[in-house]
Image (cartoon, rainbow, N blue to C red):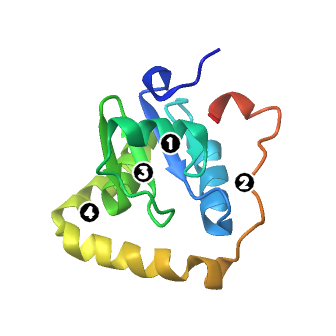
């Protein structure tokens, strides 16, 4: 099966695969994605590298979460809020935060991103998904 960026799921969450906060967040998303709307791939992986070829304006550093949704990419707080919307139910209320100007939301996001390794730690390698969630991950 070809997992290239042109064949990926409409909603893929790209995350820092060596960040403990990011890995914990991905596990939380998997547990709360009741409608199976999300797929996941590390920013350090092949799938993201292919996506960068199509969207060269995306940040290449691992300090931003990226949501690829069909033909659009969202980063930082926009990505986080849109991911919450995909969970549905109670989590859709996060959409109300779009009234906060992006510069304010991203400033808060950037503080956490800048200190995430110091506050939450990091691993030497990207997470290896368990067999039960393997289908949710792209290379």
Q: Is residue 88 visible?
A: no
Height in image: 30 above or below 125? Answer: above
Q: Secondary structure at mark 2?
A: loop
The circle on residue 49 is 1
Q: In the rendered structure, are the residues bearing label 1 and label 2 in contact, judged by CB atoms less than 8 Å apart?
A: no
| Label 1 vs 2, first from the N-terminus | 1
Q: Is residue 34 visible?
A: yes
The residue wearing badge 4 is 97
Residue 99 appears at what percent x and percent y?
16, 63
The circle on residue 66 is 3
The circle on residue 24 is none
Quadrant holding the N terminus: top right
| Label 4 vs 3, first from the N-terminus | 3
**What residue is drawn where x is 44% and y is 34%?**
11
**What residue is drawn where x is 58% and y is 24%?**
3
Height in image: 31 above or below 99? Answer: above
Q: Secondary structure at mark 3?
A: strand
Residue 104 appears at what percent x and percent y?
23, 76
Measured Cα–Cα span from mark 3 to mark 2: 16 Å
Residue 115 appears at what percent x and percent y?
53, 83
- Count neighbours of disc 4 (C-alpha within 10 A) and say few if under 14, some if 14 to 19, many if 20 or more: few
Q: Secondary structure at mark 1?
A: helix
């Amino acid at each position: 099966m070809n997992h290239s960026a042109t064949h990926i799921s409409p909603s893929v969450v790209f995350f820092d695969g060596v960040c403990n906060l990011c890995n914990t967040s991905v596990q939380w998303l998997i547990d709360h994605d009741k409608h199976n709307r999300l797929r996941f791939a590390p920013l350090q992986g092949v799938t993201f590298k292919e996506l960068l070829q199509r969207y060269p304006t995306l940040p290449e550093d691992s300090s931003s979460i990226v949501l690829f949704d069909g033909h659009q990419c969202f980063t930082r707080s926009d990505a986080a809020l849109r991911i919450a919307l995909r969970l549905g139910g109670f989590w859709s209320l996060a959409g109300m935060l779009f009234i906060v100007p992006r510069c304010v939301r991203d400033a808060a996001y950037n503080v956490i991103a800048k200190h995430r390794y110091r506050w939450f730690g990091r691993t030497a390698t990207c997470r290896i998904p368990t067999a039960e969630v393997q289908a949710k991950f792209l290379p």
